[in-house]
């Protein structure tokens, strides 16, 4: 087995690593951003794939990865892990349906609530102790899911018709345009930016460059919130207008 993931600020990385450790401590875990990840996937029949849900949908970077490497999924047994801050309905299901299109056998799905990484929306913020509770509950759920995987009875969260309807009607139908393409709405405050270059180095899309006066965003943001959570000057925003709380790096993210 191999575990692969895309993780914005570390939530999904933490969850996939914990699941793999509980299921098979000898199995490897790697990010889809690694150069040789497709070659490594091709050596395994069982795969755990993890990603953070965005508006009950797949991040554009993850969808592109699946589609661009569609031949590698045929005949492989895949367990989908979807992390989320609130609600997704069929977070695991939407990726499962895409993988089935390319011949994958879906073993099951797991939904895990984790601390929200959208740090420029005040309404989504929780007290520290509440976030700690979320992490503890997720860890317990992961242990139970790993045991069910070993028993051949993996969780099936997000895979059924009702989950599909909940995801579609709950968010995806209304916000599909937000994840259909990469975003050009990343904003960097030139008065606050200290040109440290951290946002440039952590962006999975290479969407940010350093200009003479400040970092400059491009039009290919996958909304992972990595740069926003890790900016030491809190100079970057996406959905909101100011940063309320940063949580990046909590799990040693990329």
Image: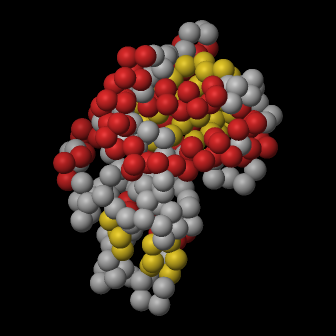
Q: Position of residue 250 (x, y in %)?
A: 41, 51
- Position of residue 170 relative to residue 158, above or below, is below
Of residues 203 and 97, the one drawn nearer to the viewer in this rendering = 97
Q: Position of residue 161 (x, y in %)?
A: 43, 16
Is residue 146 rendered to the left or right of residue 214? Answer: right
Of residues 191 and 128, the one drawn nearer to the viewer in this rendering = 191
Residue at 49% of width from left, 16% of height from top? 156
Of residues 117 and 105, the one drawn nearer to the viewer in this rendering = 105
When asked about the image quadrant of residue 106, the answer is: top right
Residue at 38% of width from left, 17% of height from top? 162
Residue at 30% of width from left, 31% of height from top? 170
Residue 62 visible within the image:
yes
- Position of residue 123 relative to residue 91, above or below, is below
- Position of residue 82 relative to residue 104, above or below, is below
Instruction: Specify the quadrant that holds the N terminus.
Output: top right
Residue 30 visible within the image:
no
Residue at 52% of width from left, 68% of height from top? 207
Is residue 112 rendered to the left or right of residue 38? Answer: left
- Position of residue 50 relative to residue 154, above or below, is below
Is residue 233 rendered to the left or right of residue 4? Answer: left
Of residues 95 and 152, the one drawn nearer to the viewer in this rendering = 95
When asked about the image quadrant of residue 75, the answer is: top right
Q: How is the image coloured?
A: secondary structure
Instruction: Specify the quadrant that holds the C terminus.
Output: bottom right
When asked about the image quadrant of residue 54, the answer is: top left
């Amino acid at each position: 087995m191999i575990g692969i993931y895309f993780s914005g600020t570390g939530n999904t990385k933490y969850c996939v690593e914990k699941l793999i450790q509980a299921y098979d401590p000898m199995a490897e875990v790697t990010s889809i951003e690694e150069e040789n990840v497709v070659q490594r996937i091709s050596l395994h029949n069982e795969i755990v794939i993890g990603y953070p849900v965005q508006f009950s949908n797949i991040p554009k970077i993850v969808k592109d990865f699946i589609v661009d490497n569609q031949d590698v999924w045929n005949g492989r047994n895949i367990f989908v892990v979807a992390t989320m801050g609130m609600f997704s309905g069929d977070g695991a299901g939407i990726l499962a349906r895409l993988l089935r299109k390319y011949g994958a056998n879906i073993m099951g799905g797991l939904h895990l609530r984790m601390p929200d990484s959208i740090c420029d929306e005040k309404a989504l913020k929780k007290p520290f102790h509440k976030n700690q509770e979320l992490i503890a509950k997720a860890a317990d759920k992961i242990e139970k899911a790993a045991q069910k995987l070993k028993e051949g009875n993996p969780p099936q969260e997000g895979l059924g018709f009702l989950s599909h309807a909940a995801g579609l009607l709950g968010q995806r139908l209304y916000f599909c345009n937000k994840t259909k393409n990469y975003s050009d709405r990343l904003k960097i405050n030139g008065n606050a930016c200290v040109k440290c270059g951290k946002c440039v180095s952590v962006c999975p899309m290479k969407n940010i460059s350093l200009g003479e006066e400040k970092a400059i965003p491009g039009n290919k943001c996958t909304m992972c919130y990595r740069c926003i959570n890790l900016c030491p000057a809190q100079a970057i925003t996406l959905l909101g207008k100011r940063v309320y709380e940063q949580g990046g790096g909590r799990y040693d993210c990329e």
